[in-house]
Amino acid sequence: MSDDGKFIADTLESVIVGMAESLREAQEELSEAAPLDAYGRPVPQYRIPHLDFEIGFKLVTDTKSGGGMRVIFGETTDRTRDVTSTISGRFVAVPPGEGLPLPVLTLEIKGTGNTRDITVTAATSAGELLSGAQVELNVDKGASTALSAAAGVAAPRLDGQVSFGRAVVETNETGIATTTLTFGSTLQRAAVVVITAELGGETVRVLTGKDL
């Protein structure tokens, strides 16, 4: 490839890569949006499935004073000739897992009093039950504190007051795992506790508490 050709190719590559980076950053910003509002209600989540683009540019053949010609991006003059071109295309989002089935979790908390039963079910987006999957359970302290404040509890006293029988559970042959959730005596009765279950990139949340 000539120097002129390499310059044009590198310039177009930089423009396209720059657009791809901007698209990725925009999706990251959208993905960071909180899944729940201040009252614990789900809020819309946005994804960019594809982006169509069109680049218009003008190539100018410039006659050098010492003879010969070069191709550049620029404006037409009395010693140049130009060619206007357009490149169009589409950026397509590649699904996580490169299109393979993704984990899907359901989390259920049942019971009353200070000890509750937790049931986690793990499957794939293709409907296959996941046996032997390790699911991690946690307390989302940030969300719990915010939702408790919205419920009128400024100091929910979460630290050390929410515990699991097992924080990591493994699903059986039917894709189900169970454990217990226990509330401590000093946890405020009206406090809202957000429990999360995580498997790979999948996270689900359930609201609970002594009065819920």
Image: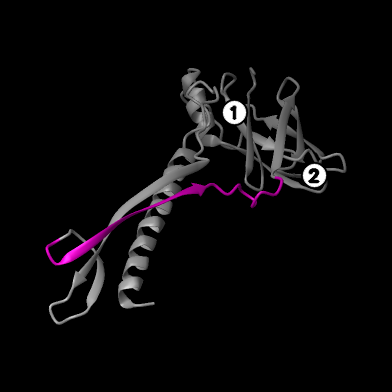
Where does residue 122 sit, x and y in percent of width and height? 76, 39
Above or below 59: residue 158: above
- Helix, strand, or loop for circle 2? loop
Task: Inspect the magenta stretch and tell me whether residue 82 lies in it.
Answer: yes
The residue at 80%/41% (across/down) is 128
Task: Write down the region rendered in magenta.
Answer: 77-101
Where does residue 106 sit, x and y in percent of width and height? 72, 33
The residue at 48%/17% (across/down) is 152
Indicate the quadrant containing the N terminus: top left, top right, bottom left or bottom right.
Answer: bottom left
User: In the orientation shown, which residue stands out farthest toward the bottom?
Assistant: 66
Q: Residues within 10 Å of mark 2 (few under 14, many from 20)?
A: many
Q: Which residue is mark 2?
A: 130
Task: Inspect the magenta stretch and tell me whether residue 15 lies in it.
Answer: no
Front position in the image: 45 or 133: 45
Indicate the quadrant containing the C terminus: top left, top right, bottom left or bottom right.
Answer: top right
Name the side, left or right, on which 88 lies relative to 207: left
Where does residue 195 sit, x and y in percent of width and height? 63, 33
Where does residue 203 sit, x and y in percent of width and height? 63, 39
Q: Which residue is mark 1?
A: 193
